[in-house]
Structure formats: structure tokens, C-alpha cells
């Protein structure tokens, strides 16, 4: 109950705990604790700067073995033993890469696995003078009060897009300066999990070593990763993976992102349901043929992003001998037949 009330003022905590106990016949049960968490989430949501995300189940992320190992090594770094050992609190990581590769899901996984509350930063920009800076200060203060916690900043480039320009009268530059100073000076165990799609527009001050512990690039999933992703989504839909040829499905979806593979499974379900039958490998392959992957429709932009990431960041996955971009998939085969 004490952990559930972290981040509240004394009056808020007293009122919420009293209400939760009344609702649960004055019994200190898990339901009473969950009630306090729900009320706290509503308060954070009303503030408009942070939202408390409570994941019911542990999210499953396919692949990304190098990133997962790095996070596992830091999972116990917030303990008293780690402090006595001389370890500082991990500051966080910036994960960027191709849209649809599971970057946002990583932050949710970190929070659930570590048992920390996940705070999602909302839009801090405001039309009134000085309000944006106030909202950013409030968000960072709440995060410190909720520590240890994971602070997720999804698509961080949108928050600081105007840094260095004069289009917003320097507001982006000021809140960016606030954020950098806070990351440098805070001693609270707040792990910042930031994601980005366009790393090229980010200010260099944010990317230098010392701001984030590591800069990760999430590439197109390889053959084994695609097999794992298919396994996750087929199992999630209540089907037995033994009934599917995962190797063939992974081979025919080379160049597809994780979200595109999920859509292949969903499209296959719609098709199978309309035919009054269950999904099969063949139906999923038909759906894959009709799904144009981003690596094909935005080929040049994706290629530039991949080259930048491979040269200047750590790869979140161990690269496979044959890159996904060199392999022919179901969509390109169908297009070749039409031509």
C-alpha cells in the first residue's frame, strides 16, 4: 500500500487509502491496493503531463537479444547491494529505428519486468507563455516522487523538434535545456526509456554519451526474429503453433516489421473467418502477398536510416549473415508475377 501511494501528497494518500479501505470492508487486500493505484492514475491523467500505464500482462517482444541482455544486466542496479557495490543508477536508453519494430513495447516490458511504475510523458507544450516550462518541470518532479520508475518518452523528436530555431519563440529550446539539466543532475532512480523514429533531427547534445547510457538501433527483424514474432501473435490468437510452418512464414516475410507481421496474422484471421475455416500457413502467406512492407514502399528513407544506425549506434539484435533487405518476400514475388 505504501508503494502504491508513492508520489502522492500526504492528504491525497490519506484520502485514497481511506476510500479504498471503505470500498473493501476495511480489509487491507490486493483489491484495496489496486484501488489506490487506479485513483493515483486518474490524478496523473488529470495533470495532463504524465499518464500512469499499468500493464496487466508482461508484453512479449520478439528478438532484440542484445538489448534484452543489456537490460537484464541493469535490472538489479537499483538495489541497495548495487549501491554498496558502487554502481550508479542507470539513466536510461534511447531506442530508435524503423517504425513498427516494437520500440514503444520495450519501455512497457522494462517496467513490467523490473516491477516499476511506467510513467508516459504527454504533450508538455502549451500556448501560454511560461506554461510549457512549468509543465515540463512538473512532469520531472512527479517522476522523481514516483521513483524508482520508468519514464517513457515516445517519439522524443516531437518534443524537441524546434530546438535551435525561432519558430516557437525558443520554447522548445528552453524545455530541452530543462530536460538535459535534469538528466545530468537528478539523483532519483528514474530510468528514461525514450524512442525515436527520426534520429537525424535530434539535437547532438542529447545523443552524446552520458545523457543516455546507450543509444540503440532496432533494425528490420531477421529470419529467427520473424519466426519468434509469428509464434507470439499466432499463440496470442489461441492457435497451436505446431500447425504452422513458421520457417516458411518467416522466409516469405523478409523485410517486414513486427507490426506488419501482426497485421498479416490479423488479415489472415479475417480471410479465414469469411471462409468459415481456421487460419493456415497458406492463408497467412496470401495475406503476406497483399501486405506492402515499409521497407519496400519507403525503401530509400529506410535504407538511409539503417546505414546511420549501423554506423553510429549499438544494434539491438545480433545481425544475421544474410540481411532481410536482400531476400525476396511474398509481396515482391507477387509484384514480379504481375509485371
Image (cartoon, rainbow, N blue to C red):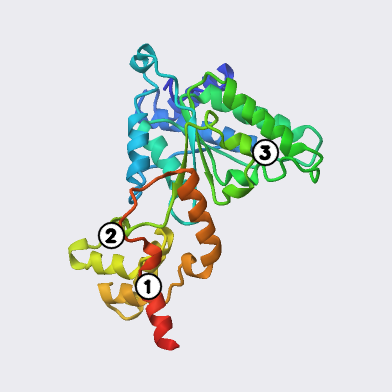
Looking at marks 2 and 1 on the same chain, the residue that comes earlier in the sequence is marked by: 2
Task: Check the picture and name the quadrant holding the N terminus.
Answer: top left
Q: CA distance from mark 2 to mark 1?
A: 14 Å
- Residue 135 is drawn in which quadrant? top right
Q: Residue sitting at 64 percent across and 34 percent down? A: 47
Q: Secondary structure at mark 2?
A: helix
**Circle 2 residue:** 227
Indicate the position of residue 288 as horizontal and vertical percent values. 37, 72
Label located before the other in sequence (3 or 1): 3
**In this orientation, does residue 218 appear?**
yes
Whether residue 208 is situated above or below residue 280 in the rendered picture: above
Q: Mark 1: few, some, or many residues within 10 Å (few <14, many ≥20)? A: many
Q: Quadrant of residue 178?
A: top right
Image position, residue 224 (x, y; %): 28, 57
Quarter of the picture containing the C terminus is bottom left
On the image, the x and y values in percent for residue 116 come to: 42, 30
Q: Earlier in the sequence, mark 2 or mark 3?
A: 3
State the image coordinates of residue 314 (x, y, percent, origin top left).
43, 42
Up-down: is 133 above or below 310?
above
Rendering quarter of residue 290 = bottom left
Q: Who is closer to the viewer here, 26 or 116? A: 116
Amino acid at each position: 500500500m505504501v508503494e502504491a501511494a508513492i508520489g502522492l501528497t500526504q492528504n491525497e494518500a490519506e484520502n485514497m487509502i481511506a476510500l479504498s479501505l471503505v470500498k473493501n470492508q476495511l480489509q487491507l487486500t490486493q483489491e484495496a491496493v489496486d484501488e489506490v493505484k487506479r485513483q493515483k492514475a486518474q490524478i496523473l491523467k488529470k495533470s495532463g503531463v504524465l499518464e500512469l500505464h499499468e500493464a496487466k500482462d508482461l508484453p512479449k517482444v520478439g528478438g532484440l537479444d542484445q538489448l534484452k541482455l543489456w537490460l537484464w544486466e541493469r535490472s538489479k542496479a537499483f538495489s541497495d547491494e548495487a549501491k554498496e557495490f558502487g554502481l550508479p543508477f542507470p539513466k536510461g536508453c534511447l531506442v530508435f529505428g524503423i517504425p513498427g519494430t516494437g520500440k514503444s513495447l520495450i519501455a512497457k516490458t522494462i517496467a513490467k519486468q523490473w516491477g516499476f511504475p511506467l510513467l508516459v510523458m504527454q504533450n508538455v507544450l502549451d500556448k501560454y507563455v511560461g506554461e510549457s516550462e512549468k509543465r515540463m518541470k512538473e512532469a520531472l518532479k512527479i517522476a522523481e516522487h514516483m521513483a524508482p520508475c520508468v519514464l517513457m518518452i515516445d517519439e522524443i523528436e516531437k518534443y524537441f523538434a524546434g530546438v535551435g530555431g525561432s519558430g516557437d519563440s525558443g520554447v522548445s529550446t528552453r524545455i530541452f535545456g530543462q530536460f538535459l539539466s535534469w538528466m545530468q543532475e537528478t539523483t532519483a532512480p528514474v530510468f528514461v526509456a525514450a524512442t525515436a523514429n527520426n534520429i537525424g533531427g535530434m539535437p547532438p547534445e542529447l545523443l552524446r554519451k552520458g545523457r543516455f547510457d546507450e543509444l540503440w538501433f532496432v533494425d528490420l527483424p531477421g529470419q529467427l526474429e520473424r519466426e519468434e514474432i509469428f509464434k507470439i501473435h499466432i499463440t496470442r490468437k489461441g492457435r497451436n503453433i505446431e500447425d504452422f510452418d513458421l520457417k516458411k512464414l518467416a522466409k516469405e516475410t523478409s523485410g517486414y516489421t513486427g507490426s506488419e507481421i501482426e497485421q498479416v496474422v490479423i488479415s489472415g484471421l479475417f480471410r479465414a473467418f469469411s471462409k468459415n475455416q481456421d487460419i493456415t500457413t497458406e492463408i497467412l502467406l496470401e495475406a503476406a502477398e497483399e501486405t506492402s512492407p515499409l521497407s519496400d514502399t519507403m525503401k530509400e528513407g529506410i535504407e538511409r536510416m539503417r546505414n546511420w544506425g549501423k554506423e553510429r549506434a549499438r544494434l539491438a539484435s545480433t545481425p544475421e549473415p544474410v540481411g532481410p533487405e536482400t531476400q525476396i518476400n511474398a509481396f515482391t514475388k507477387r509484384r514480379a508475377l504481375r509485371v
